[in-house]
Image (cartoon, rainbow, N blue to C red):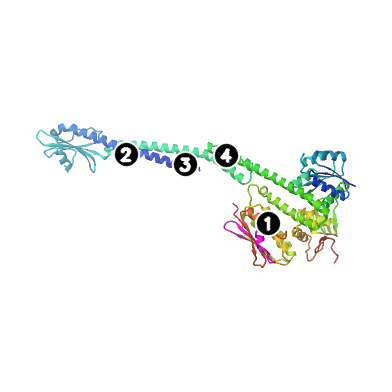
Amino acid sequence: MPHVLVIEDDPQVRAALLRALDERGYATSSAGTGLAGLHSAVTDQPDLVVLDLGLPDIDGVELLRMLRSVSAVPVIVVTARDEEAEIVATLDRGADDYLVKPLGAAQLDARIRAVLRRSTSDDPVSAVVVAGLVVDPASREARLDGRLLDLAPKEFDLLRYLSERAGQVVSKRELLAEVWRLPYGGADKTVDVHLSWLRRKLGETAQQPRYLSTVRGVGVRLSAPEES
Amino acid sequence: MRRQLTALVAATTSLVLIAFLVPITLLLRSEAEKRAISAATLKAESLAPLAFNLADGPLPSSPDEGFVVTVFEPDGRIVGAPAERTPSVALAASGEAFAARTRDGVEVLVPAQTVHGGAAVIRVLIPGSALYGGVLRASAVLAGLGLVLFTVGLVVADALGRRLVRSVRGLATAADRLSAGDMSARVPPAGPPEIRQAGAGLNRLAVRIAELLASEREGVADLAHRLRTPLTAIRLDAEAVRDPQLMTDIDQLERTIDEMIRTARRPVREGVVASADLVDVVRVRVGFWSVLAEDTGRPMSTYLPPMTLAVRTSPTDVAAAVDALLGNVFAHTPDGMPLQVTIRPQLKGAVLVVDDGGPGFGNLADLQRGRSGSGSTGLGLDVARRTVEAAGGFMAVGRSPLGGARVELHFGPSE
């Protein structure tokens, strides 16, 4: 049972996070201030820390730097700020992943599992292979039948997410939440237009799909093309 | 400015010099004439006692005077320089001494009574050249002096203008850099007190703007924290209840809050200057959405003018507004419906028109007010409306010639 330390100053959010993590089978502990959290991280030696950046006593980024100097524990940063520059800076300072508030329990659970998987595995992240499609998360490159695909960052993230779930139907709500980190609005066409671009770059169309097929009313699935 | 200042000094100096030199020259001329007439009168009076004893021939004269002396004897003889016996001579012979202006200059006529009872008349003619002797030279000296003063005035004005222009140019350069968004620009303290004062004021203003932007940035970050943190607790609690309707409502609330934060970030995003090329941004966004149009069988036509059309908002916001409008068309019209994007340049600003062949808007009045009836269409239109209003324009909705909805974004001028 992995032990997760939650460092969050808001008592309601802290309580809700602890309850959600308890329900998903994690051992939990918490701290309401940065310094108490640092002390707990050093003494309790949790398997993972969920760190809110907006703390009352010390800046979250500064706490992350201090934590990194004494411990290699994986840290998932939770922040209300969604500017890309700040997120990149936070990751550069040693965070293993980040989540923008408001976050869902399932999303947090998935991120914790992914970070724990990475931290416990000695192997580097391996490339995903679906027939002639190879998606390499480490180099952020994708190749189709040996040819390098020219993908925009979001297109790569979308392809990676789908390829890691090859054969499964993934809903647009899930894609919006996991790839774009946006709430689902019902009428959002962001996912559709990116899927259209991805189809173009994979050399297929909605009418003649190969790797990407739409399951009407459910979502989209990436799978190996059927032999004709 | 330097040229204008020099021209002003040239005009002022010229007027002052003219105002002084012209009366002085006229006075000199008048004095010279009076002096010459006095000398001529004295000459005539000095000859008066000898007038009746003069023999024919030349008269005694001073070589430097330049006068022409003639004596009209009562017996009709004319002694000295030949001259006509004019009516003036006859008048003088009646006993009146006077000076009169003639074609050759000024003549001074003095009568001299003889012992025989008749009157001789001594006429001294002052030729034009002798009348104003020395005036020309004095005028030349005055003109030279005037020219020197004029030149000195110009040189001093130019030096002063150069100094003023240098300090004003520093002020203008700093103002240009600030208006272009460079908040580090400062005016170096130089020039006259008024320019220094204006520079110091501009520097204080720059510091204040930078402080306000920093404060705005902090405020928006704080707003995001204050709104999103309690929403996290609500979402986590709602997930525990497992009510799909509640989750949908929370999704909608999240999107609204995201849009509020995005709107609040506008000043930070735009900085001091907001400008975007509407045509360029629309071309890129239409290109982005065109693949979805192809995949959904929608004929998509675009009419963009071959020019740059600057609007007063950031490229990010224009792109978000275009995405919102096009996304609405894809979300709320059936596949296969036509779509048209047009930009019309205006005298001041530009109009972006998005037409579709779908079912059109249900309640135009609600949409005009930016209300969200279903929680989907309204938010997209609200993004577009806020963007165009922040750019000094407005949004209008109506029926499209394609049979569906039309949305017009009327952008104001870029400055």
User: Of marks 3 and 1, which one's residue comes earlier in the chain?
Assistant: 3
Alpha-carbon distance for marks 2 and 1? 83 Å
Alpha-carbon distance for marks 2 and 4? 51 Å
Q: Looking at the rendered structure, which numbered label has been put on residue B382?
A: 1
Foreground: A71 or B306? A71
**Residue at the spot x=50%, y=43% of the render?**
B1
The residue that label 2 is drawn on is: B26
Foreground: A220 or B259? B259
Callout 1 amino acid: Asp
Is label 4 in a helix, a strand or a loop?
Answer: helix
Residue B289 in percent (x, y) is at: 71, 60
User: Of marks 4 and 1, which one's residue comes earlier in the chain?
Assistant: 4
Q: Which residues are magenta?
A: B343-369
The residue that label 3 is drawn on is: B6
Chain identity of mark 2: B
Callout 4 amino acid: Gly
Horizontal placement of B60 versus A133: left or right? left
Is label 1 in a helix, a strand or a loop?
Answer: helix
In which image quadrant can residue A183 be found?
bottom right
Callout 3 amino acid: Thr
**Residue at the spot x=85%, y=58% of the render?**
A166
Chain identity of mark 1: B
Crowding at dot 2, Cα within 10 Å, few <14 / some 14-19 / many 20+, comes out as few
Chain identity of mark 4: B
The residue that label 4 is drawn on is: B199
Alpha-carbon distance for marks 4 and 1? 42 Å
Alpha-carbon distance for marks 4 and 3? 24 Å
Asked if marks 3 and 1 touch (Cβ < 8 Å), the reply is: no
- Between tags 4 and 1, which lies in front? 1
The answer to if B367 sits in the magenta stretch is: yes
Is label 2 in a helix, a strand or a loop?
Answer: helix
User: Of marks 2 and 4, which one's residue comes earlier in the chain?
Assistant: 2
